[in-house]
């Protein structure tokens, strides 16, 4: 018990240290980067396939560039009146938001068939008519860029209320030209942010330039989509309309990526050329290539996806497919309106779970052999991965895999070091106390023949004895744990002395009892008689008593004994073995110890043992029984004492009992009952006679309680 407590304390301490070390290491750049890469791998390998229907992306793709060049003889950048035409068309189709991921920061250029002023004016007028257009604005850190002027008021002005920490101030910006500022609804910041490893995962939502709040493009689109321009921020996030956006302490929202980027994957993609063709087909009275309902009540994001336009970004899904920058805004917008954001497991919960898991793992390493501990470690090592996958797919929550694996590795290393440092000390201690727990004959045998310390054993004939303190469980409630230990130590010292005096081997302690073997490891022809001598010594020991809580408590030792063939030797595993005995002989001895409870006897021996000692030891036949789990029936006896020391009164009682037992087996239960009562009157303190008196009464009503041979089946162990 003390050893297990020490192991448990050591396991908890190692678990705490490993958990704290993992938490500290998570703050390092290397572990943090590995953790993020592990999360990216989970994204790519176990993402839930989803196709948000709130968004349509108009792709300025290579196909569109080719179409304009080959059919319209227009090179990039396209004239602004094309955007005007498409803005009108999308508005007529019912799009709720039209967001351009294109920075129109300079006027259009003059062309042969259309002037720049005309094209810009057409686009501005189309935005004014639509009333739902968001244009890209680039926030600038550098003051060397020509300072931009912005309109005094946008059609929708963001109203922000919340912590200053959420606002990202910029000294400059690259904004659309002034006519476009006055025609669009609101600008949307399109800055691209990455973590230290160059991957985009978190985006600041609120920007400020000259005391003007400029939301991120996706947030601006959400404002137009909901018709709500009020942004209310608190400790846990930013709220717009009925949508809550969780953010970190810097006001950054972590995106939940739905899947690989590009056409045919997550979002509905429409090529700009297809959009133009659909418009022209409607004008000609034809069925459009892209149905009008495709854009109804949708947020439409227009942006470049062609590789040559250099708007491909690095995201967790970039290793699978190129990820267009416009899809980042579409993703965040969908996160907002669908309420889907990635979360991270609270570090407090992780600490508790980690401590429990690591303490258990360390305890395993201290209790089991290296192969079992390694197997458990492999299983434990897989747990964070499976938990992370489950939480990601079902709760949109990231479980820190790398932290957890680092904690597991550190805890295993720590417990191996502790085991290595303590093993030598423990071996020395074991050698010091070895003789206290093993019979001197065994120690001598092993000393002279160390090669016998190996797996296996040999079959011999011996006698096995099991003892137990009657009523000790209830009695122990009166004592403190310290008193119980002190009392048991004193009791076992006397039991051990009796066993050794009769050449027995103390095999093991069984709680408040013992298992002893007579005739091993040194074989003896008198093993049954020696064991009976020990039982007679236990009867004398039963005269001991203690006084506690005003009560005198009698210490009665119950004994079960059986003789026969058994296997004795070093039994166990290569790492831990005991010199003990196994076999049916041993099992029956243990059963007989428990049968004492039924008859009120202090000892019971099998007929095998009785046949070996009946010439020297006076015994009383008790019953013919069949114990649970054993088909063969047997007669059981109780030791009365040495034959030459039995007084006349005891002999008369034994004679009466034997006569009563014969009547009982002849099923003459009335006369048997009278005879047992006569024996009880002779020895009123006899515990056996009352048992048979009650049974005879029961048999008169239920003769099937015993079978035709008079065998009583015991159904309890």
Image (tube, rainbow, N blue to C red):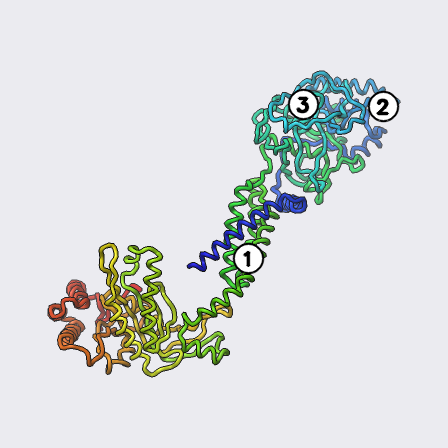
Q: Secondary structure at mark 2?
A: loop
Q: Can you give x and y, in whole percent of width and height, for residue 396 in the image? A: 58, 40
Cα–Cα gap, marks 1 and 3: 55 Å
Q: Is residue 425 left or right of residue 521?
A: right
Give the quarter of the image for residue 242.
Answer: top right
Q: Can you give x and y, in whole percent of width and height, for residue 610 in the image? A: 26, 78
Query: Is residue 277 at all visible to an observer of this figure?
Result: no
Q: Residue furthest right?
A: 112
Tag shown at residue 108: none
Q: Residue furthest top?
A: 152
In the picture of the structure, the residue carrying the numbered disc 3 is: 213
Residue at image location 77% in from the left, 25% down from the top: 174
Q: Earlier in the sequence, mark 2 or mark 3?
A: 2
Tag shown at residue 109: 2
Q: In the depicted view, which residue is nearer to us: 154 or 128? A: 154
In the picture of the structure, the residue carrying the numbered disc 1 is: 415
Q: Are marks 1 and 2 in contact (CB under 8 Å)?
A: no
Q: Earlier in the sequence, mark 1 or mark 3?
A: 3
Q: Earlier in the sequence, mark 1 or mark 2?
A: 2
């Amino acid at each position: 018990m003390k050893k297990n407590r020490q192991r448990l304390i050591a396991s908890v301490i190692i678990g705490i240290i490993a958990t704290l070390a993992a938490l500290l290491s998570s703050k390092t750049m290397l572990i943090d980067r590995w953790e993020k890469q592990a999360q990216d791998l989970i994204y790519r390998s176990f993402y839930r396939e989803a196709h948000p229907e709130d968004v349509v992306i108009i792709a300025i793709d290579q196909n569109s560039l080719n179409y304009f060049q080959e059919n319209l003889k227009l090179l990039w950048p396209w004239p602004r009146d094309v955007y005007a035409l498409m803005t009108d068309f999308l508005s007529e189709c019912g799009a709720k938001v039209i967001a351009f991921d294109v920075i129109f920061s300079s006027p259009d250029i003059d062309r042969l068939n259309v002037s720049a002023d005309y094209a810009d004016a057409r686009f501005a007028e189309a935005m004014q008519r639509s009333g739902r257009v968001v244009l890209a604005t680039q926030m600038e850190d550098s003051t060397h860029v020509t300072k931009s002027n912005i309109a005094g008021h946008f059609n929708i002005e963001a109203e922000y209320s919340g912590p200053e920490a959420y606002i990202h101030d910029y000294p400059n910006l690259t904004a659309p030209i002034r006519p476009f500022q006055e025609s669009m609804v609101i600008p949307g910041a399109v800055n691209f942010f990455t973590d230290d490893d160059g991957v985009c995962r978190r985006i600041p939502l609120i920007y400020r330039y000259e005391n003007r709040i400029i939301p991120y493009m996706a947030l601006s689109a959400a404002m137009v989509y909901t018709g709500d321009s009020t942004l209310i921020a608190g400790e846990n996030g930013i709220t717009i309309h009925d949508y809550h956006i969780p953010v970190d302490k810097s006001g950054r929202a972590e995106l939940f990526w739905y899947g690989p980027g590009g056409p045919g994957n997550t979002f509905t993609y429409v090529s700009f050329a297809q959009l133009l063709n659909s418009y022209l087909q409607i004008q000609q009275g034809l069925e459009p290539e892209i149905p009008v309902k495709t854009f109804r009540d949708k947020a439409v994001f227009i942006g470049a996806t062609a590789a040559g336009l250099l708007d491909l970004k690095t995201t967790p899904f970039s290793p699978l497919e190129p990820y267009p920058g416009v899809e980042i805004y579409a993703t965040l917008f969908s996160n907002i309106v669908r309420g889907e954001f990635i979360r991270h497991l609270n570090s407090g919960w992780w600490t508790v779970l980690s401590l429990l898991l690591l303490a258990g793992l360390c305890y395993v390493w201290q209790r089991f052999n290296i192969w079992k501990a390694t197997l458990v470690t492999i299983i434990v090592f897989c747990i964070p991965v499976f938990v992370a996958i489950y939480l990601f797919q079902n709760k949109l929550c990231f479980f820190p895999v790398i932290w957890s694996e680092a904690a597991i590795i550190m805890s295993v290393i720590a417990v191996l070091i502790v085991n290595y440092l303590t093993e030598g000390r423990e071996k020395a201690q074991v050698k010091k106390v070895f003789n206290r727990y093993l019979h001197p004959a065994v120690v001598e045998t092993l000393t002279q023949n160390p090669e016998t310390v190996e797996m296996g054993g040999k079959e011999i004939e011996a006698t096995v004895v099991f003892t137990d303190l009657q009523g000790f469980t209830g009695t122990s409630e009166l004592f403190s744990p310290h008193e119980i230990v002190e009392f048991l130590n004193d009791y076992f010292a006397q039991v051990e002395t009796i066993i050794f005096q009769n050449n027995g081997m103390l095999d093991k302690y069984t709680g408040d009892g013992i298992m002893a073997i007579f005739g091993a490891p040194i074989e003896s022809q008198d093993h049954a008689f020696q064991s009976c001598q020990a039982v007679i010594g236990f009867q004398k020991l039963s005269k001991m008593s203690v006084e506690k809580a005003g009560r005198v408590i009698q210490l009665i030792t119950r004994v079960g004994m059986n003789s026969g063939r058994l296997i004795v030797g070093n039994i166990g595993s290569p790492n831990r073995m005991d010199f003990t005995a196994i076999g049916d002989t041993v099992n029956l001895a243990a059963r007989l110890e428990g049968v004492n409870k039924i008859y009120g006897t202090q000892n019971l021996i099998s007929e095998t043992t009785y046949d070996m000692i009946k010439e020297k030891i006076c015994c009383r036949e008790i019953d013919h029984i069949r114990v649970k789990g054993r088909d063969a029936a047997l007669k059981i006896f109780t030791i009365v004492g040495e034959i030459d020391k039995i007084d006349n009164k005891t002999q008369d009682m034994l004679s009466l009992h034997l006569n009563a037992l014969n009547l009982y087996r002849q099923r003459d239960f009335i006369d048997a009952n009278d005879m047992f009562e006569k024996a009880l009157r002779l020895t009123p303190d006899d515990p056996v006679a009352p048992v048979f008196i009650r049974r005879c009464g029961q048999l008169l009503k239920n003769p099937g309680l015993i079978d035709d041979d008079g065998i009583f089946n015991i159904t309890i162990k």
